[in-house]
Amino acid sequence: MSQNVQAPIRFSQVVARLAQTAAILGILGAALFLGAGRLDWWEAWGILAIYFLIAATVAMWILFHDPGLSAERSRVGKNVKPWDKVLVSLNLLFTLAQWAVIGLDAGRFGWSSVPVGMRLLAGCVLLSSFGLSFWASQVNTFLSGQVRIQAERGHHAITSGPYRYVRHPMYVAMILNALSLPPLFGSWWALVVSAIMISIVFVRTALEDQTLQTELPGYAEYVQQTRYRLIPGHGNP
């Protein structure tokens, strides 16, 4: 009788995931401080440290509890949709632009004045975006960062957790992140870039949903059960 035994997590895998998380945040931090034109922005360093700790904790949880998902999210998969490669590249460019504008605004020129209460609220929204993405990761082992059908992993529709309410909770988390990060740092102007990023998310959600309805077994039936892509009851079935 064969048994599916999970191989032990190697130390090198832990280091690789932490290094990957640090590298991503390092690139974003570079855009932030280049925009600010200085490194003695201690408030930003504090936010970055908390951001890294949360992201690293989630990455470690996924690695130890769902190594298949961890591997999926850390590599370039096959049969990725060509349009998704374009949208991911655009999102990356605008994410870098968002962090650079935050640096220019809150770190260098001080164009914005964000009240402390609003910044605290933004921090709570940012934490909720992490919580939502973590919840989605707990129930969806196919939560790839790329739009592709993972036939080799037995890809099928997930209907539990946040997927009972919306079909794309990870994109909801991305929207919350894009809306909350600029005011948390103290920038209103970066929300202009956030609006562009959110429009890309809406386009990507619609295209991915069409792909899944056409190619993923059980997804068309799931659409009849969970009728809204992003916002329950608000015209986006």
Image: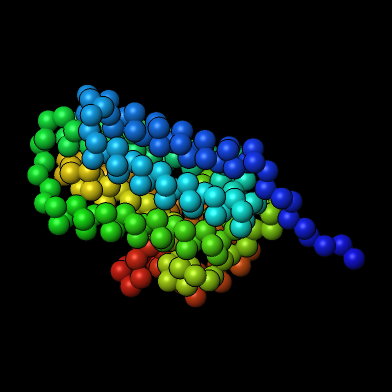
Q: Quadrant of residue 197?
A: top left
Which quarter of the rendering shows the N terminus? bottom right
Residue at left offset 49%, top offset 52% = 58
In this rendering, position of residue 66 left or right of residue 117:
right
Q: Give residue 103's position: percent from left, percent from top.
A: 23, 33
How many numbered badges does the structure rendering display?
0
Choose between 49 and 95: the one closer to the eye.
49
The figure's colour scheme reads: rainbow
Q: Residue furthest right?
A: 1
In this rendering, position of residue 218 left or right of residue 185:
right
Q: Is residue 76 above or below residue 31?
A: below
In this view of the protein, can residue 115 be seen by the observer?
yes
Q: Give residue 141's position: percent from left, percent from top.
A: 59, 58
In this view of the protein, can residue 215 be seen by the observer?
no
Residue at left offset 34%, top offset 28% = 30
Residue at left offset 37%, top offset 46% = 51
Q: Residue furthest bottom?
A: 225
Choose between 82 and 5: the one closer to the eye.
5
Residue at left offset 42%, top offset 47% = 53
Q: Is residue 131 above or below residue 203?
A: below
Q: Quadrant of residue 45?
A: top left
Q: Give residue 23's position: percent from left, percent from top.
A: 46, 33
Which quarter of the rendering shows the C terminus? bottom left
In this rendering, position of residue 69 left or right of residue 132:
right
